[in-house]
Each structure stands twice: as structure tokens, then as C-alpha cells.
Image: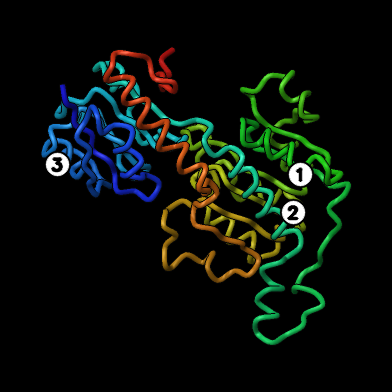
């Protein structure tokens, strides 16, 4: 029996890799998704049994009712765009790839942090402009002895702590869902949210976007942080109130921010973040490496193939029913 798989043309999805894995059991086509309407149209046209979707394409209960899918695969970690409860209720398996880029995102978090601490982008701009600046326009501070605070302490934050273990930092974290043994393993002190903001010289935002976390890092949070604090976000853009962040950077309430994720992606052309020299920006690329891209496509395709064969996928997303 030949199945049909529709791939999003999203940059993380490699059609050639997907076809190498699935080609003996499925016809594989690529489509531009990005909306419920585009999803339904593409899957209906291909009579799809599975879809590999992207972060920008909502997979809703209505779409699932219209289509006859067996698998909705997310070629990444996050799956907040997929109605997992509705899919499970309809017998549709949802998969993701939870750990394909843990090392890459942690490394990128450290790279953004160090870029902000040492103001390397500002120095780079000065040298390229024919200048030889002794200082980058703001005071720099020694890293040793400072405190790195984590908002959420999952796998990526844990790897970040490992990578930062040689810098002479103290570690604190706010995460009501992580156990004490895990925190102790990484030498991290559990703190309340208010204490996190009060104590962190560097704030690493690693939280997923949920109703609980959206806008969590707001104007009050920036007021609570020291004015030489640095904020890094490689989690989800919606966790930070972007307007409040812009105000904090412009008014000197914090020293700098390193951002790989934003409230709207791609970053809006009129975003004031583009104008701020104390903001280091990257295009949601923390995941990126040749190895991570190969791994995410290999596991996505292999899990689809496993479901087609009546087997359990290696990474099945379960609903959060109570």
C-alpha cells in the first residue's frame, strides 16, 4: 500500500532526506503551508495520510475533521500550533523531535550572552566603520562572580548551565515543574520568580509559549532587573513583552539583550529592536547545524514510517488532559 505525505516547504524540512526514508512506502510532495486553508488544500489535493508541518501553520480540530490524516509530524521541538487533544481524540498521531538541537540552542544561547557581555557586535561595527573604539558606548563588567538566572530549566537550559560551568557564575532558576534533584545536579538554586529577577545579572529565557508564560517577562520584570542586566531569549518570543523590552533597552533599565525569537517572525520591518545597538538579533536560527537538520528530518520521516507500519513512534506527543 502506498501512502501520501505532504511536506511543508519550511526551511527546516529537507524533501530529499524525507524521500530517502519514505520513498519506498509513500508518495512525498511539498507544499507552501502557513495557514489552515493552505494546509487543508494541500492535504486534500494529495489525499494525504501524513503532513510534516511548520510552526506557522495551525493544525486545528476543524482541519483534522476535514482531512483523513494518520500522522501530524512537527519537524522541530515545539508543537503549540497543533491541537494535540483534538488530534488524539480523532486517532491522529502527533510527533515531534524533542532533542535534535539541544546542543545547538544552548551553544547559541551562550554565544548571544557572550556577545552582549563583551559587546562584540558594537566593536565589530566600529572597526568596520574605520573607528578604533576603546569602549562600546556602555560599561562592560567582569563575568566571573555574576549570577545567571534561568526562566525554565529544561534540557536546553541544563546544557547551557553545563557550557557556562567554567565561567565562575552562580546559577539560579525559576521552574515550578523541575525537581530538586535535577537542579542540584547542575548546581542551580531554586528561586521564586521575583527573586529570579532580583538576583539575575544575566537572564536566560527558555520557557515555552503557554497561556501561563506569554508576556511573563514584562515591564515589572525589567524594572526588577539591575540596569546592567543582560537578557537572552532562545525560548519563545511571546514570553517577553517586546514593547516593554524595547523601552527597557532604550531607557537603560537593562544593558543589553540577545534575541533569537520574537513575538512576530520574521521580525517586523518596523520593529524598534532593529534600531537598538544594545540588541543582538538572530533569525530564529539557534537550532541550525548540518547535523541538527539531518537529525530532525531523519527522525520525523522515520516516525511517520513507524506509524504507517502500525508501530509506536519514538517521539509521540501526548495530550495534556487532566
Residue highlighted by disc 1: 200
Q: Quadrant of residue 49?
A: top left
Compare marks 2 and 3 and give the one earlier in the sequence.
3
Marks 1,2: beta carbons within 8 A: yes
Q: Nearer the viewer, mark 3 or mark 1?
A: 3
Q: Is 291 placed left or right of 169 in the picture? A: left
Q: Residue at x 80, y 39 (%)?
A: 165
- Please rate how many residues cluster around mark 3, counting C-alpha atoms within 10 Å: few if below 14, some from 14 to 19, many from 20: some
Q: Residue at x 33, y 32 (%)?
A: 21
Give whichever of 88, 250 is nearer the camera.
88
Give whichever of 221, 164 is nearer the camera.
164
Residue highlighted by disc 3: 41
Q: Where's residue 56, x and y in %?
A: 34, 45
Q: Residue at x 32, y 37 (%)?
A: 20
Q: Is 42 placed left or right of 137 in the picture? A: left
Compare marks 3 and 1 and give the one earlier in the sequence.
3
Q: Secondary structure at mark 1?
A: loop
Q: Where's residue 288, x and y in %?
A: 51, 49
- Please rate how many residues cluster around mark 1, counting C-alpha atoms within 10 Å: few if below 14, some from 14 to 19, many from 20: many
Residue highlighted by disc 2: 229
Q: Residue at x 36, y 41 (%)?
A: 17
Compare marks 1 and 2 and give the one earlier in the sequence.
1
Amino acid at each position: 500500500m502506498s501512502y501520501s505525505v505532504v511536506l511543508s516547504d519550511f526551511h527546516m524540512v529537507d524533501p530529499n532526506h524525507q524521500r530517502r526514508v519514505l520513498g519506498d512506502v509513500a508518495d512525498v510532495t511539498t507544499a507552501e503551508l502557513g495557514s489552515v486553508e493552505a494546509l487543508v488544500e494541500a492535504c486534500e489535493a494529495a489525499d494525504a495520510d501524513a503532513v510534516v508541518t511548520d510552526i506557522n501553520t495551525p493544525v486545528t480540530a476543524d482541519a483534522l475533521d476535514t482531512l483523513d490524516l494518520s500522522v501530524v509530524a512537527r519537524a522541530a521541538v515545539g508543537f503549540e500550533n497543533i491541537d494535540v487533544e483534538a488530534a488524539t481524540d480523532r486517532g491522529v498521531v502527533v510527533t515531534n523531535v524533542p532533542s535534535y538541537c539541544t546542543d545547538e540552542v544552548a551553544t547559541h544561547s551562550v554565544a548571544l550572552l557572550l556577545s552582549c557581555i563583551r559587546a562584540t557586535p558594537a566593536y565589530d561595527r566600529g572597526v568596520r566603520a574605520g573607528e578604533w573604539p576603546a569602549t562600546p558606548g556602555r560599561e562592560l563588567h567582569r563575568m566571573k562572580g555574576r549570577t545567571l538566572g534561568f526562566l525554565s530549566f529544561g534540557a536546553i537550559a541544563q546544557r547551557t548551565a553545563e557550557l557556562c560551568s567554567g565561567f565562575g557564575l552562580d546559577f539560579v532558576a525559576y521552574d515550578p515543574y523541575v525537581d530538586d534533584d535535577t537542579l542540584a545536579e547542575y548546581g542551580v538554586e531554586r528561586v521564586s520568580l521575583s527573586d529570579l529577577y532580583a538576583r539575575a545579572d544575566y537572564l536566560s529565557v527558555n520557557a515555552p509559549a503557554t497561556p501561563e508564560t506569554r508576556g511573563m517577562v514584562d515591564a515589572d520584570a525589567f524594572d526588577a532587573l539591575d540596569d546592567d542586566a543582560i537578557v537572552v531569549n532562545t525560548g519563545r518570543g511571546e514570553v517577553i513583552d517586546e514593547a516593554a523590552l524595547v523601552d527597557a533597552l532604550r531607557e537603560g533599565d537593562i544593558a543589553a539583550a540577545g534575541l533569537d525569537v520574537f513575538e512576530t517572525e520574521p521580525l517586523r520591518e518596523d520593529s524598534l529592536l532593529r534600531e537598538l545597538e544594545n540588541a543582538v538579533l538572530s533569525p530564529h536560527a539557534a537550532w541550525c547545524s548540518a547535523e541538527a537538520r539531518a537529525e530532525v528530518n531523519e527522525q520525523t520521516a522515520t516516525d511517520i514510517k513507524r506509524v504507517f507500519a502500525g508501530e509506536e513512534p519514538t517521539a509521540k506527543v501526548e495530550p495534556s488532559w487532566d
